[in-house]
Image (spheres, rainbow, N blue to C red):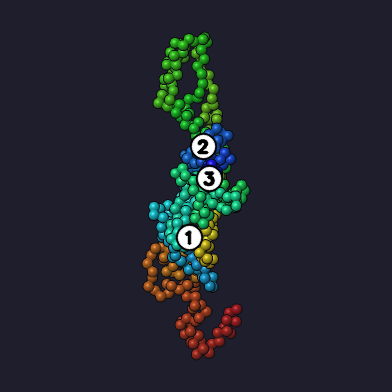
């Protein structure tokens, strides 16, 4: 009977053992730095604990992340097909309906909000995730996943899964169910995820937080330094209480700024802290701004901070802005476009389809630059006048030549270049009737 009970219980024991192993695998381990940093943060050399929330309270970090996310998310995103003759045709399929500027990524977000969140997570944690929801083989939505609640994991057999912490319960999603945009640094430590700028810049952010706290405490104390009142005798308990009430309390706090105290009977003041000028607090905070901007790849002038002796206007600032768009915004767009092609478009089997942000939209607020761009495109035969009008959200022109490519030569259609106009034909006929040789005349002029 005993043997029968043991044999019957064996499958249940095996199930329990497997269940326990799976639970252990999904628990937060001691060597899981990313997992623990999500809850407790990282301690900087300045003694401040840096978490995602505390980092976002630093004005410089907030501005760098916000401006970059807004710049990328404001660009129109379209899906195109590359066809014969190197021709590009805009496509309006299920993928474009989800990721495109005119689509809907999910039930709750607009395209701008979705991509703004993706870029924000990319710049803070180095990774951005969204769950792919499909109907059959068609993509129906992208549900954003908080990067602090998701991480890629390689199983013992090498399979890549994404471990998502959903309300305290861990769930593994297969790689084909997750849209993952990786930031800089994948491969330096882990080929499956990018490096977090906040984690890598813990010491810089911690120093800025410490300087900010010190400045706040200094102002809260009415700009008075920390120190001691020195007495030439030993005070008893009652005398200490009276001295504290008469000297210390009336001078503490910003509300008592400008108050006057009385020192008597040989009492002296001994300062034990540097004043803001001696501590070079302003220079320190200025350096912190520039240091944090380096971590996020945003020039300080973009967030309203001018370096020593630098003007806020002029061609120099314009060059810095172009450099930021080229080296900061464009690489982020390239990362997203590459991931869309690899994870959303390629699985459909169409290798000639791709998604692209319209960088021209960055000219939207610069009327002079936009006018120069459109003039160059139309006058050089790269864009029709109706295509130019579409860029300005104007209705199409009824002129039949408005849909033809033209060049600067009096706006002559491309297919009419090299052909004689009616005026030239009449002039040639008159010269032939008069017996004037045009080639001989040209040689004489030469």
Which residue is depicted at the point 55% across and 32% down?
Answer: 47
In the rendered structure, find residue 4 and report the number of the disc placed on it: 3
Q: Position of residue 429 (x, y in %)?
A: 49, 87
- Helix, strand or loop under label 1: loop
In depth, the one of 191 and 184 nearer the eye is 191
Residue pointed to by mark 1: 358
Foreground: disc 3 or disc 1? 3
In depth, the one of 235 and 47 nearer the eye is 47
Is residue 16 shown to the viewer in this render? Answer: no
Which residue is depicted at the point 58% across and 40% down?
Answer: 31
Of callouts 3 and 2, the N-terminal one? 3
Q: Position of residue 135 (x, y in %)?
A: 43, 60
Q: Position of residue 215 (x, y in %)?
A: 49, 32
Residue pointed to by mark 2: 40
In the rendered structure, find residue 346 and report the number of the disc placed on it: none
Question: For the C terminus, which image quadrant?
Answer: bottom right
Which residue is depicted at the point 55% across and 29% down?
Answer: 278
Could you give the CA–CA distance between mark 3 and mark 1, rounded to whole angstroms?
72 Å
Q: Quadrant of residue 248?
A: top left
Is residue 446 shown to the viewer in this render? Answer: yes
Badge 1 density bin: few <14, some 14–19, many ≥20, Cα 10 Å: some
């Amino acid at each position: 009977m005993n043997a029968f009970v043991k044999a019957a219980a064996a499958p249940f024991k095996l199930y329990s053992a497997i269940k326990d192993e799976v639970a252990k695998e999904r628990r937060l381990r001691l060597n899981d730095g990313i997992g623990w940093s999500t809850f407790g943060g990282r301690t900087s050399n300045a003694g401040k604990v840096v978490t995602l929330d505390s980092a976002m309270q630093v004005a410089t970090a907030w501005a760098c992340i916000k401006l970059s996310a807004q710049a990328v998310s404001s660009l129109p995103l379209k899906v195109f097909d590359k066809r014969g003759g190197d021709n590009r045709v805009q496509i309006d399929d299920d993928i474009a309906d989800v990721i495109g500027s005119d689509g809907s990524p999910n039930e709750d977000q607009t395209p701008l909000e979705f991509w703004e969140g993706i870029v924000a997570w990319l710049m803070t944690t180095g990774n951005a995730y969204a769950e792919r929801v499909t109907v059959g083989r068609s993509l129906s939505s992208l549900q954003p996943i908080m990067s602090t609640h998701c991480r890629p994991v390689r199983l013992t057999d090498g399979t890549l899964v994404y471990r998502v912490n959903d309300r305290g319960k861990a769930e593994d999603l297969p790689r084909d169910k997750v849209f993952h945009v990786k930031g800089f640094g994948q491969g330096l430590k882990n080929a499956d995820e990018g490096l977090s700028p906040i984690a890598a810049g813990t010491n810089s952010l911690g120093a800025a937080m410490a300087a900010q706290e010190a400045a706040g405490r200094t102002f809260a104390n009415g700009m008075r330094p920390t120190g001691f009142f020195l007495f030439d005798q030993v005070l008893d308990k009652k005398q200490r209480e009276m001295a504290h009430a008469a000297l210390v309390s009336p001078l503490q706090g910003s509300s008592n700024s400008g108050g006057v105290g009385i020192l008597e009977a040989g009492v002296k003041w001994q300062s034990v802290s540097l004043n803001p000028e001696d501590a070079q607090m302003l220079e320190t905070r200025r350096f912190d701004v520039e240091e944090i901007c380096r971590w996020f790849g945003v020039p300080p002038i973009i967030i309203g901070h001018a370096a020593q002796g630098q003007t806020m206007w002029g061609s120099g600032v314009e060059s810095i802005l172009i450099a930021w768009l080229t080296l900061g915004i464009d690489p982020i767009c390239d990362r997203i476009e590459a991931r869309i092609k690899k994870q959303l478009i390629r699985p459909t089997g169409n290798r000639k389809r791709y998604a692209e942000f319209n960088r021209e939209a960055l000219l939207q607020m610069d009327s002079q630059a936009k006018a120069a761009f459109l003039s160059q495109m139309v006058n050089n035969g790269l864009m029709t006048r109706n295509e130019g009008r579409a860029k300005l959200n104007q209705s199409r022109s009824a002129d039949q030549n408005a849909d033809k490519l033209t060049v600067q030569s009096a706006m002559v259609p491309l297919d009419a270049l090299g052909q004689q106009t009616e005026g030239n034909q009449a002039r040639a006929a008159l010269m032939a009737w008069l017996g004037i040789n045009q080639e001989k005349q040209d040689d004489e002029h030469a």
